Image (tube, rainbow, N blue to C red):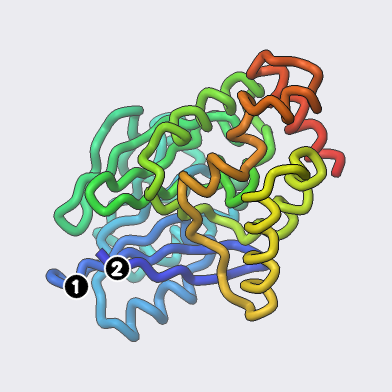
Amino acid sequence: MQIYPLPVLRDNYIFLLVDPSSSTAAVVDPAEAAPVLSKLQELQLDLVTIFNTHHHQDHVGGNRDLLKVYPHAQVYGSVQDLGRIPGQTVGLEAGEQVQFAGQGAEVYFVPGHTRGHIAYYFRTSGDLFCGDTLFAGGCGRLFEGTPAQMLDSLDQLRHLPGNTRVWCAHEYTLNNLRFALSVDGQNLELRKRMERTQQMRQRQEPTVPSTIAVERATNPFLRWDDTSLQAHAGSQNPIAVFTYIRAAKDHF
Ligand code: ZN
Ligand code: FE
């Protein structure tokens, strides 16, 4: 499976997944149809699957126009999002497997940003598509969920193998790391990551994908058991630490 990130809108990424052996493609969170259609044409591929992580417009905005050209494509999303993801054909539950390119993708139920948010984990290749749940250096805002739900969702992702590639849906990394340094400034790994990230952005390179190992070491939203973050939050309770950091980021 080959993965092409397509930067769209202000700071979104659409991911085009390609199975060269069958000349088929899948797309993760098509915010818009046009860039996907032109890439499919360029590579001469048939679109067979749309993977949606959640119902927000900047993740499903291209569904309808893609289906006009590829009406046979399956549209996957959470069972909770049936009725609010355009063209959705399958409602998925936690633990289900879906197939693409001869590989299974496991469905993780990761509410918090929205109540129906899911992530797709391709265990064989080590690729995680997590939408607006886990970001490089950050996490999604809590629009339809509680801190406890988001913490549980992030904890599931935190347990994936360290070399798992984290394909999140937005290029928010630089801002996320600025905030991370404000609550975890003594973290050497984090400081080095900031330097690397600044250089990458100066060269206009994407900072996505990240890896689970890098996130565990530097992302404050995965570090509720770190003593310096606990000291910042004034608590050792994971939910209290997470709630404190999320609120601080909301006002950063
Ligand atoms: Zn969203
Ligand atoms: Fe988004």
Instruction: State whether residue 21 is above or below residue 226.
Output: below
Q: What is the quadrant of the C terminus in the image?
A: top right
Residue 187, percent from left and from top = 69, 44
Residue at 36% over, 55% down = 50
The amino acid type found where label 1 is placed reads Pro
Res 160 quadrant in image: top left
Residue at 29% over, 38% down = 106
Does mark 1 have its CB less than 8 Å from ligand 2? no
Q: Kindly identify which residue carries mark 2.
A: 2
Could you say whether the residue bearing mark 2 is in a helix, strand or loop? strand
Contact check, label 2 and label 1, Cβ < 8 Å: yes
Q: Kindly identify which residue carries mark 1.
A: 20
211 vs 30, nearest the viewer: 211
Could you say whether the residue bearing mark 1 is in a helix, strand or loop? loop
132 vs 93, nearest the viewer: 132
Residue 231, percent from left and from top = 78, 23
The amino acid type found where label 2 is placed reads Gln
Res 218 quadrant in image: top right
Of labels 2 and 1, earlier in sequence is 2
Q: Is residue 189 left or right of residue 67?
A: right
